[in-house]
Amino acid sequence: DGGITQSPKYLFRKEGQNVTLSCEQNLNHDAMYWYRQDPGQGLRLIYYSQIVNDFQKGDIAEGYSVSREKKESFPLTVTSAQKNPTAFYLCASSIRGDRELQETQYFGPGTRLLVL
Amino acid sequence: QKEVEQNSGPLSVPEGAIASLNCTYSDRGSQSFFWYRQYSGKSPELIMFIYSNGDKEDGRFTAQLNKASQYVSLLIRDSQPSDSATYLCAVDAGTALIFGKGTTLSVSS
């Protein structure tokens, strides 16, 4: 089955701790994205990557870091500098090329991060 | 600052009625428009995309786009209780999408 997987489903972070959220896709998509969703809010873009070994900051990148060493993987690290990390984190991917599908993004199931 | 605006709702309709969800956007250069459905606690799933002015139909769903008015809408015909969810409008901003905050739809049986 092709799709996007995220792990873990729930993650607990202690004060001052860095935590890493996993995102893997086997859709052969070039582009991958990380969003944060707070209750009653839309999705806010944290980071995105259009190609391996390259990524760009989104609207709320402070306190987060990413890497894109493989096409299939785009992990997100929530650092201790992110003072309010409690949120629902969504990873997405999109194929590039065909105009009609250019920016259609498909989402993983999400990771809910809670602060202890 | 590029923006996408939606009425947060809740929009309440009886079963079998037509639900109309609306979205406006600020960037005149946007070319692609998307509607996602998100059930509580779940991730968004794509319902439809549209990039030409006019209507696009897929089953009970119709997306309508008016680029001159910077307006996109989603009609759901014969609404079902299973349609109760939050509907997110998304607009392309070149290399990423900008999402609205979503409209919560409640369909009563």
Image (tube, rainbow, N blue to C red):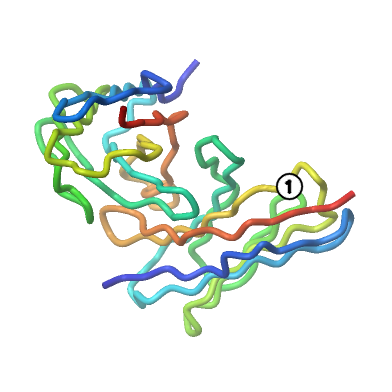
Foreground residue, B51 or A11?
A11
Q: Name the subunit of mark 1.
A: B
Q: Tell me the amino acid under the disc marked 1.
A: Asp
* Residue A85 location (% of width, % of height): 28, 39
Foreground residue, A59 or B25?
A59
In the picture, the quarter occupied by the N terminus of chain B is bottom left
Q: Is residue A40 left or right of residue A57?
A: right
* Residue B64 location (% of width, % of height): 62, 68
Residue lying furthest top in this view? A1
Q: Is residue B85 left or right of residue B28?
A: right
Badge count: 1
Mark 1 Cα-neighbour bin, 10 Å: few <14, some 14–19, many ≥20: some
Q: Is residue A33 above or below residue A42?
A: above
Q: Secondary structure at mark 1?
A: helix
| Residue marked by disc 1 | B83
Q: Is residue A68 left or right of residue B89?
A: left
Query: Which residue is at a point 28% across and 37% down the rendered structure image?
Result: A32
Foreground residue, A65 or A51?
A65
* Residue B63 location (% of width, % of height): 63, 62
Query: Which residue is at a point 14% across and 48% down the rendered structure image?
Result: A62
Query: Which residue is at a point 22% across and 56% down the rendered structure image?
Result: A59
Query: Which residue is at a point 44% across and 37% down the rendered structure image?
Result: A106
Q: Is residue B85 left or right of residue A93?
A: right
Q: Quadrant of residue A105?
A: top left
